[in-house]
Image (cartoon, rainbow, N blue to C red):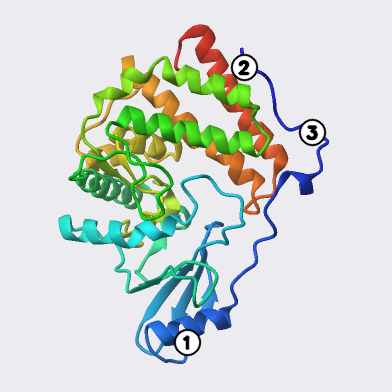
Amino acid sequence: MYPNHVIPPNAAASSLIPDPSKRGILRETVVELMNEAVGKSTWLCEQFGAGKFSQTFRLTGTWRQYVVRVAPPDSMLQLFYERRMMRQEPDIHRRIQAKIDIPIPEIVHFDFSRKKIDRDFLIMPLLPGTPLSEANLTGSAWDRALSQWGSHIARIHTIVDGQNRFGYLGAHHPMEPQPTWAAAFREMFRLELGDIAAAGIYSPQTAEWALGLLDNRLGLFDHCRTPHLLHGDIWGTNLLVARDGTVTGVLDFDRACWGDIEWDLAVAEYCGVTQPAFWQGYGTRVQTREGEAAIRRLFYLLYEHQKYVIIALSSRRRDPAGARRYASECLDILNNFERTNRPDF
């Protein structure tokens, strides 16, 4: 059984969050960036969006609207793969646009030099539509959105890395590329456990125990021999739709990874996306609840659930009680798996 090491309930919140308050970028600064990168105009600048990682601004000029996304400061508590992850998006977008036809925005400008501001930022045209999470679609419009989303994700999964590398491969370089998916996912799981241990939620012994449970089944992950492009963040905020459910934009590839499509579809399942209409658009329902696939699904869902330990602790939420809850849920699931060998999540 795991060593039950979680933050004590009476710990002071200020001691649990090592990053300072998120210092925001001012709208006046964003207008200056736009004037220099796109051209001078009388820009109307508004902050918008549901995300709490990057700051997002809508810039309305005389002829066109743009989106400026500004990454958080490096000092914010982040997961290993989140650090400077915006830096992989320009290349991901180029590769997608060269291979398939799906509605993603063109990145018209980006700057990762930190010379103009102390953050990474990029600029894209504003696509039409409303995030699915806010669109209140029902009936045929809802089914249309999920079906088209499934079709777009299936196309994304046809893109493969020509060098046969697995894991997070982007310019942010959070890990070394691996020659197999099994090795890549082990490293991803290890680094995530390390982040949680470094934050004081898991003890080193708990992290080692959890990794050992994966190691005992690592051979089950050798089924994936091709590094497919994986979106990594398939949830309603990252899909833009029209009122009739037509998809107008697929967004936010900053968490993209290369490997097993089952991993990406587990993220979609976790976020409630894998409904019948989604599978209709995807083209085939990937079965992950039986046999060896069920064990992979368990670890993929745990990888997704565990990330909220760090997210809850960071200045995105400042919720140490939530972090303890996520940690306890994950460890209970792993402990049950160790006892019963049943991959229940």
Q: Is residue 22 above or below residue 63?
A: above
- The image quadrant where one finds the N terminus is top right
| Mark sitting on residue 9 | 3
Q: Which amino acid type is marked by label 1?
A: Trp
Relative depth, front residue between 50 and 231: 231
Tag 1 residue: 43
Tag 2 residue: 2
Question: Which image quarter: residue 61?
Answer: bottom left
| Circle 2: element type | loop
Q: Is residue 246 visible?
A: no
| Circle 1: element type | loop
Q: Is residue 343 above or below residue 247?
A: above
- Give the CA distance from mark 1 to mark 3: 48 Å
Q: Left of 89 or right of it: where is 117?
A: right
Foreground tag (3 vs 2): 2
Residue 223 x, y percent position in the rendering: 25, 24
| Circle 3: element type | loop
Relative depth, front residue between 320 and 130: 320
Q: At 78% across and 49% down in the image, what residue appears?
A: 14
Q: At 45% across and 12% down in the image, what residue appears?
A: 342
Q: Residues within 10 Å of mark 2 (few under 14, many from 20)?
A: some
Q: Left of 169 or right of it: where is 338?
A: right
- Give the CA distance from mark 3 to mark 2: 19 Å
| Mark sitting on residue 192 | none
Residue 12 x, y percent position in the rendering: 81, 43
Callout 3–callout 2 Cβ contact below 8 Å:
no
Question: Which image quarter: residue 124?
Answer: bottom left
Q: Left of 313 or right of it: where is 12?
A: right
Q: Which amino acid type is marked by label 2?
A: Tyr
Q: Is residue 20 visible?
A: yes
